[in-house]
Image (cartoon, rainbow, N blue to C red):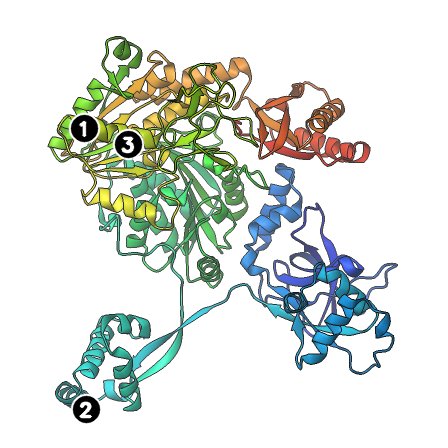
Amino acid sequence: MYHYYFEVVLPVPLNRSFTYSYVSESEGNFCGCRVLVSFGRGRLARDLVGVVVSQSVASEPIKTSYTIKSIIELLDLSPIFSDKMISFLYWLSSYYLCPIGEVFRSALPSIFSPRLVHKFFLNTDKLLIDTGKLSLVRRRILDFLSEKKESVSLSDIENACEVKNIQYHINYLLAHDYISFLSEKKESVGIKYCKSLEISSSLLSDDNLLASTLLELEKRSPRQFQVLNYLLQQQKDGNSSILLSEVSKLFSGASSAVRALVAKELISIVEIEVTRNNFSGADKLAFRDESLLDLTSEQKNCFSEIKSTLKTGKYSPFLLHGVTGSGKTLVYIHAIKEALSLGKSVLVLVPEISLTPQLIDRFEIVFPGIISVFHSRMSDGERYDSWRSVLLGRVRVVLGTRSALFSPLSNLGLIIVDEEHDSSYKQDGQLPYYNAKDAALYRGKLEEAVVVLGSATPSLESYYNSGFGKLQLLEIKERADSAVLPTVELIDMVSARASGQVLHGFSRILIDKIKEKLARKEGIILFQNKRGYSNFLECKDCGHIPQCKYCSVSLTYHHNSRELRCHYCGYTKRVINTCEVCGSNEMYRVGIGTQRAEADLASILLNEGVEAKIARLDLDTTARKGSHRKILQSFFRGETDILLGTQIVAKGLDFERVTLVGVISADIQLNLPNFRSCERTFQLLSQVSGRAGRSGDLPGEVLIQTYNISNYAIQAAANSNYKDFYEIELEKRKTTLFPPFVRYCLVEFSSKEEKEVIQAAKNFHKLLASGDEFIIYPPSPAPVSKLNNYFRHQISIKNIKKIDPNGTKLQKMLFEVLNKYNEIYPSKVKIKIDIDSFSSF
């Protein structure tokens, strides 16, 4: 017998592992396997699924001064996490100062955490004495159990006895041996099986029998003939197993026909495993195998560099900087094919999967059957099948959002981070607060993989790092397919308003250009980075603006639902026509959101005798699963004339029919209190401008409406000049000491009691160490000082990279201060440490 001692990481907010024992008749490596364990003591014990991160083995049990619990069950025969993945997760914990338990909770989908269901029964081997001393509630529970022949779940007892706080009474009855329980493991989701139809092998092997059978069925049983003939056609096309549900949909009366064919032993019904596909559908947005396209000379050069490093099997990080429409995706495709030919697997990260259905379709055509998609809108069944397919090696290409970084790909050889500049790669809402782009580089280093960061507008940090050898720069300066960059015109809205050339937020120049493109039946994309109808309501008499009840922000007006809505916490209230402060009836709508832009444009065009179908693409219209794809498919087919939306329209769209892009307000991002506001403005304007003129036959035009026409970010975007923007912004960051020259960290304090938050921030600030490697700012209210009914204060820390290049001194200081703070000032105030913060609120 082998006595194993496992160090197990559990999904709890603690920065440590726990020791459990396991006895086995054979040797094995269990690191990376899931185990079901009991965590906690006595009545507080609960069953959790953890991951073994290290193990030791002995021939005899080790004697200790404390009790080592045994695991309840070993859940895996082989590891689901490799040693490299475990090292990667520990790095995430260390760098982002996140408890290792929270990192593993994030990495392991909850569907892989089966739970134990306890079922209770009456103890019949003991006399139930003194039951008269029990409370009425407890006697009622015993009476209910005595009536049952089988063990009963806790929820059944609770419902039948109508008892509140049922666990308290159950614990008492267990402790006094009135009842006992059995535990059953319950999986949250499993393999899906469906009924399939298969033709008899004897029928398929005898041509004469097959011909006579078909002839007989055609004469006597037309429906049976139709079903069997359909199955034969599918067999010829390579589909040996056809789902019964599919046949039932195609033919009326199929059920009776199938039963008859089974009775005649011409076909059989078998159960087969089916994969719940989360991205297939009839409404495709791509139709050609792009791997067959010729590469341009610039694309060839980039691919050649990537190809040569793939063959070495060494870690090599690249920054692929290509203008919009330059064919970066085609370079990705060729790189993926090369990696697959070398027996490697591939991970492709995208900012938001719901924004890139076209990319999914393009990849599926080139890599049919070996690609899986990971994203937040997957069902539990889809997520289970995707993970299982990766673990079994059926899938070799994973495409997904930042969480796909944890997919258990073996022999990983290539990681692609598309739109690497996008802020969506930074996780902000829950632990760990990691940047998937930076984490991808570290995983690539551990896996000895090639990492390609791609963008038309690289982040300042990435481009800066390419100048110091941390990333190898690859450039594509020309568009593919003989297409040219669109012409860009800036519209000065200050002058336009002064001359009366603005109607409901649309300049006359933009309106006329829209009408011109509509007359030519060409596609139009309009960008307004603000959803809702208007920014807010304001009283004309006293200036009051309705605020969120739980956040220190104004409520956005939504016309369709006639409500005011908070875009931070979701709080809503009915539209008010009377001012809550002064009683005035003069409440007017300020600003333009996508709802209002859609309504106003439709009204303008109708009044000028022009008909157009406008589709809105924002968070409100894409909330339902599949709605985003349907909207894009309608626009792709030309059924929709104008696509109007938020930044969703700026990403991942490649429609040759689009010849006009209009930016309704270029200034929204500029006004945010964030040092990245100019960079994000430049990136958004450049990205959305790149949607126009992607065909060599149809040149594109871009009209940008702005009240800040001289702003360097807007000017650089209009001139498609990344280098100019980079040099100006870099000098600005150097002067003000922001990334890439420092590591920017935010320590946030939040509580429902404002005084507690203020005091906690002050106490924490006192403990922070001073030094040349840190610039520490005093506590201050967050830009949104109240969020979800929590008051928020923050401390900003700048970590000088020249002195502390890897951030180890910053991590050490914050780790020590956090522990010391918790010892001296224990409180209920939540503390969030955000390394490399992107936060803007």
Disc tally is 3
Q: Residue at x 24, y 9 (%)?
A: 499
Measured as percent of width and height from the top left, residue 121 is found at: 72, 76
Foreground label between 2 and 3: 3
Looking at the picture, tell me which residue is in the foreground, 761 or 65. Answer: 761
Mark 2 and mark 3: Cα distance apart in space = 65 Å
- Which comes sooner in the sequence, label 2 or label 1? 2
Q: Which mark is residue 209?
A: 2
SS of the residue at dot 1? helix
Q: Mark 3 highlights which residue? A: 598
Q: Quadrant of the N terminus?
A: bottom right
Q: In x, y percent, where is residue 814? A: 70, 31
Q: Residue visible at 26% across and 78% down? A: 254
The residue singled out by tag 1 in the image is: 605
Nearer to me, 417 or 184: 184
In whole angstroms, how far apart are the C-alphas of marks 3 and 1?
11 Å
Residue 20 picture location, percent across and down: 74, 61
Callout 3 amino acid:
Glu
Position of 634 compared to 272: left or right? left
Q: Kindly state the secondary structure of the residue where label 3 is placed.
A: helix
